[in-house]
Amino acid sequence: MTQYATLFLILLPGLAAAATLREALDAAVERAPQARGLEAGREEAAAHRYAADRLFPGMPALGLGQREGEGGKREFELELSTPLWLPGQRQASLALADARIEENAAAYAARRWALAGDLRNLLAAAQVAKAEVELARARLENDRRLADEVARRVAAGDLARADALLARGEVLATESAVLEADSRLTRALRDYRVLTGLAVLPTEVVETLAPRSAEAMTQHPALDSARRNVELARAGLELTRRTRRDAPELGVQVQTARDVSGADYQNSVRFGLRIPFSGEARNRPLLAAANGDLIRAEAELAQATAELENELQTAQAELANAERAEELARARRQGATERLRLMRRGFDLGELSLAQLLLARGLANEAEAATARAGLSLAAARARLNQARGVLP
């Protein structure tokens, strides 16, 4: 990490360091609003489960009444009523509550997987920027040494002053490249900090390619979340089918009354059952809405399956291309390095001009940078394939 990027991170308050990629992912999940909202949703889902497991579907109600008439007639009423479960409604409510808990857990895992993809992309960009800074600084050191050598040979009369100006121009151009690379690294680190709240990149970011497994794809977080959403919609539809009418109510009424003033009060107890009617005007919209939720959930599952299969095939093809590109880049670097060695010998013997040497150095530097980028692209391709397979750090 460059001194400018390091200073930038030191000046940021409240930052911590991550030792591993998993710790960086944990930090990103902790900061993500959606993930925190899903964590809060666990309590909501548990509350629905608690409510569905009660003896009655709702809270009882207490009613009080008093009536007075001519001649001292007076009545007092106390009524306690409670809603009742419809046949199969309680089991359907429990199934819906369990489905909601499982869907929430699956959605949390899917969100964590999505954040892992964001983290992998940011780390890949940061590694590229870091490599560019290191390569630019190494080139700058080499250019400065060459400029000093050219200056000595110009002073000795071996080279023209134009060569010194050319060498100095190369130093200035490389210094500008260092600044540009450092700015890109600073931006990459800032993006990483926004996602994770951490100050330092993980020490180990190169991932090992996870083995291919059909079972692993069936457990893919995104697919599992989509499947759980389908199960939730089915449970909702079943509860709607079981709730064909509003909840019936069972009531107990205690009445104390007297007919005339001075007479004794007579007590009576009355039991009542209130059963609301069922009808298409009530049920059809509810069933249509619940069935629509199920259709949408199944469509989303099919779409997620197709998208992940396409992503997996793309990631596999990209990995194969990255492996071949890395091999070609290493072969190119080997040839450019050997050519530079020969050109350097010719320049030292006075057989070649500085311009020819700088051209060879430029080609060698480009080959070195291409090799570094190819290596990082290969590592990123492995990470993307792990991501497509649903493998978390």
Image (tube, helix red, strand yellow):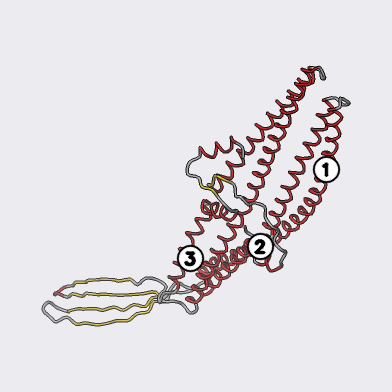
Amino acid at the residue labelled 2 = Ala
In the rendered structure, which amino acid carries the disc numbered 1?
Answer: Gln
Left or right: where does residue 302 sit relative to residue 361? Answer: left
Q: Residue at x 61, y 50 (%)?
A: 203
Q: Residue furthest front?
A: 156
Secondary element under disc 2, as helix, strand or loop, is: helix
The label number, if any, that marks residue 152 in the structure image? none
Q: Position of residue 278 (x, y in %)?
A: 48, 74
**Residue 346 position in % (x across, y down):** 87, 29
Displayed quadrant of residue 275? bottom left
Q: Position of residue 126 (x, y in %)?
A: 64, 44
Task: Give how far across and how far down residue 327 sits, in percent.
Answer: 81, 49
In the picture of the structure, the residue carrying the numbered disc 2 is 299
**Alpha carbon separation for disc pair 1 and 3:** 61 Å
Tell me the residue at 82%/39% (across/down).
337
* Residue placed under numbered mark 1 in the picture: 334
| Amino acid at dot 3 | Ala
Marks 2/1 in contact by CB < 8 Å: the verdict is no
Q: Nearer the viewer, residue 169 or 183?
A: 169
- Choose the circle earlier in sequence order: 2 or 1: 2
In the rendered image, the residue lying farthest to the right is: 351
Tell me the residue at 22%/71% (across/down).
66
The C terminus - image quarter: bottom right
Residue on which the image places disc 3: 45
Q: Quadrant of the N terminus?
A: top right
Q: Earlier in the sequence, mark 2 or mark 3?
A: 3
SS label for mark 1 = helix
